Structures are given as structure tokens and as C-alpha cells.
Image (cartoon, grey):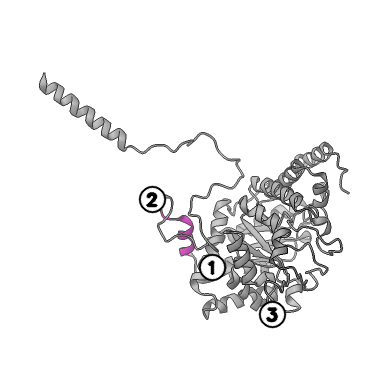
Amino acid sequence: MKQWLRSGLIILFVLALTTACAPKQAPGANQGSTAPNAPQPDTSASDAGSGSGLAEGENNGGQEKNSVRSKLEQLSTAEKIGQLVLVGVEGTAPDDTAREFVEEYHVGGFIFYKNNMENAKQAAAFFNQLKKMNAGNKVPLFLSVDEEGGRVTRMPKEFKALPAAQIIGASGSTELASGLGSVIGKELAGFGLNMDFAPVLDVNSNPDNPVIGSRSFGNNTEIVSEMGLAMLQAIEQEGVIPVVKHFPGHGDTSVDSHLGLPVVKHGLERLRELELLPFAKAIDNGADVVMIAHLLMPELDSEHPASFSKAVITDLLREELGFQGVVISDDMTMGAVVKHYDIGEAAVKYIQAGGNVVLVGHEKDRQLAVINALTTAVKNGEIPLDMLDERVYSILKLKEKYGLRDEPAAGPDIKAINQEITDILNRHEIKPVK
């Protein structure tokens, strides 16, 4: 009897020990999921500054190797440099230049304009061909557009037009901003596009501004902040990366930066009271990408435009506002840059100042000048290898967060999207846009 009791106690002790050591399921595990196209939670480490990341092997408890770091280590120096560049191409189908950018230079992505998108069928085929072309590369492409609504739209004519941000702001309805952001996200995601240079967070404080105007939600910082955040989150929910622009604020300018270099004489005190507020709110609410404007702000940096100023990108955006995501430049082929600076030198200074992605929308010669300048700067140590890795790490982390893949897209449901636009405009008593 005593031996039986002793054996039973031993068995109970072993069972208790086994149960105590068994792995426990995380709270909420398998109790729901995010929207199918929404960005997946980032299980890699959060990074400080411009994306330095963790040492190899470090992430959630050190149990698994950081997948982003692993991918970074697989890239050659040339492939890393390619990730720093986003280019535009001519025409309505991939040509030899597009193939060269993908296969020889391993560019991180493309930007598309109205003349690249003749109609929905052609556009979908164009984007799918580029993805197929990129299949031999280790990193999927950013496929991006400026789709704001209003006068800045790239969508084919089959889609109903969307109202400008100014109309949304005047309505005072975050529901409208969110609804139209969702429409934009669905349009882009249907094509397989994964990045939108929107929403505009510039406060339209200068009524004579030649470049912002109706693209802004208004001249009130609270309205711009609320509408911008609502649109940003709605775009993101469709699995498309929203890019807030044009930091640190393009609203009070009298020169179009496409044509020349605007000079903004405001100091930090004024910027903190007005222009920076919408960006700060977006950053506090998880904005992943910020576009830097081509503005000369002598009170902050008398030598360099904001787009390649360390005072603006690192000191103001990253350190003061705490932004840890990806920084992309406005198009380096704009007059604000090419009329005053060497484009290759500007691109190098931009990376040194804390930027991640150089946008070069036009002209192959200028695009190659940027790639060659970055390559030379890495070779001669102007861009040290650890800096290169930091910049590219943030890019890879962003692509992984949104689950970017070079898989073909079926194309958007134009009829359903147009009906959704009609319903939203009717519900908010806004006349259809012609």
C-alpha cells in the first residue's frame, strides 16, 4: 500500500512539473485577425534613429533571427544602393530602360504618372510585368503614385473623380476623409500598387501659394491634422503605404518647387506653432513614411534645402518629432534642385542627412547620375557601410511590415469602387466631381 501511494505521488509530481514547463499560448492568440490587406504587425525590433535595427539574432526574446536583418545580410552593396532609389519610366509598358533599372541596378521601386496609365487593363498589365521582371531580385518593389484626389490624380479615366482635400476639409467630416481614403486604397491595391504619396499635411496658410492650394485640407491646423490622419489610416487599412507630405510644410510658399527653390523664412517657433502640428500628430499615430520638401529654410539651414538638410531631417524630424520610419525625398528632378545643385551631389547629401529613399521621377541621365553618385560615395566612404545598412534596413523593414510581394494583381473592381464613390458623395451631399 505504501509503495503504491509513493508511486502515485511521484506520477502526480511529474505531471505537475510538465504542465508548469509547457509553453503558454499568448493572450488573444487565434481570437481574431486584422483585415486581409492591412499591414501585418511588425515582429522585428523597433529601431531608433534612421533604422539601425538590432544586432543579428536579437528580436522578441532572442528566440529567432531577425528576418529583416537576415535579408539585409543577403544583399550585395550594389543591391543595397539600388534600394535607396525610386525611379519613374516612360510609356505604358516596361521597356529596356525599365529592365535595366530592375536587372542591373536593382532599384527599390517605381513611381507612375498619368501618362503611364492609359486605361485600367493596360495599367494592371504594366505593373504585373514589372513585378515579373523583378522576380530574380531579393527584394519586392515599391510601386507608387501621387493619388490625392482633386487635381492630383493618376487613376485611369474609368474611375469617378474624387474631390480635392480642400472640399474634404471644408466638410469637417473625418468620416468623409476616411471613406475617400479607403476608396483610394482600394483603387491602388486593386492594381497591385503599394505606396501612395498622400495625404498632404501642408497647412494652406498662404492663399497665393501656387503649388498647394486646394491640395490642402485647409488653413486650420486642427482640421488638417484630423482629416489627414483619418485619410492616412484608411489608406493603410487597404494595405497601401501612405506617405505624408511635404515636411516641414509647403503651405506658406510663393514659388512652385517644380520650377524654382522656395524660401521660407520661418524659424522653429513658428513651425512648432503651425506647420509641424499635422506631421507631429501623424507621427504620434504611427505614420511610416514622410516626404521631405524642396524648401530653403535659412533659419534652420542657410546652405541646404530641407530635402538634404541634416538640421531638418535628423535634428527636427527624427530627433525632435521622434520619427523612426522611412524618409523619402520629393522628386530630385524638380527645378528647386536641378536649377541650383548637382543632382548626384544632392542625393548623396540627402542620404548623409538622414534620408532613406531618393525619388528621381524623370530623365534616365539624371536617374543614372544619382545611382552613380551614390555608388561612388559608398566606395569612397562618404556614405559609410554602416550608414548604408541603416538606411536600407528601414526600407526592408517597411516592405516586410506591409507584406510586399511581387505577385500579379487581378485589377480593381471599377464598378464597385465607382458605386462606393457615388454613395459617399451622396451621403455627404457633395456634388460629383467632373
Q: Residue at x 53, y 76 (%)?
A: 378
Q: Total number of numbered labels?
A: 3
Q: Where's the N terminus, which quadrant?
A: top left
Quick check: is 69 in the magenta stretch? yes
For disc 2, the marked residue is 63
For disc 3, the marked residue is 342
Name the main secondary structure of what is drawn in magenta: helix
The range drawn in magenta is: 63-74
- Pinpoint residue 341: horizontal percent, then vertical percent: 71, 79
- Three-letter residue code for mark 2: Gln
- Three-letter residue code for mark 1: Lys
Q: Residue at x 54, y 54 (%)?
A: 400
Q: CA distance from mark 1 to mark 3?
A: 23 Å
Find numbered disc 3 in the image and state the secondary structure of the residue it sits on.
Answer: loop
Q: 71 or 211: which is nearer to us?
A: 211
If you read the primary sequence from the N terminus, does the residue marked by circle 2 or circle 3 appear first? 2
Find numbered disc 1 in the image and state the secondary structure of the residue it sits on.
Answer: helix
Q: 137 or 286: which is nearer to us?
A: 286
- Seen in the picture, residue 261 relative to 61 is either above or below; the reply is below
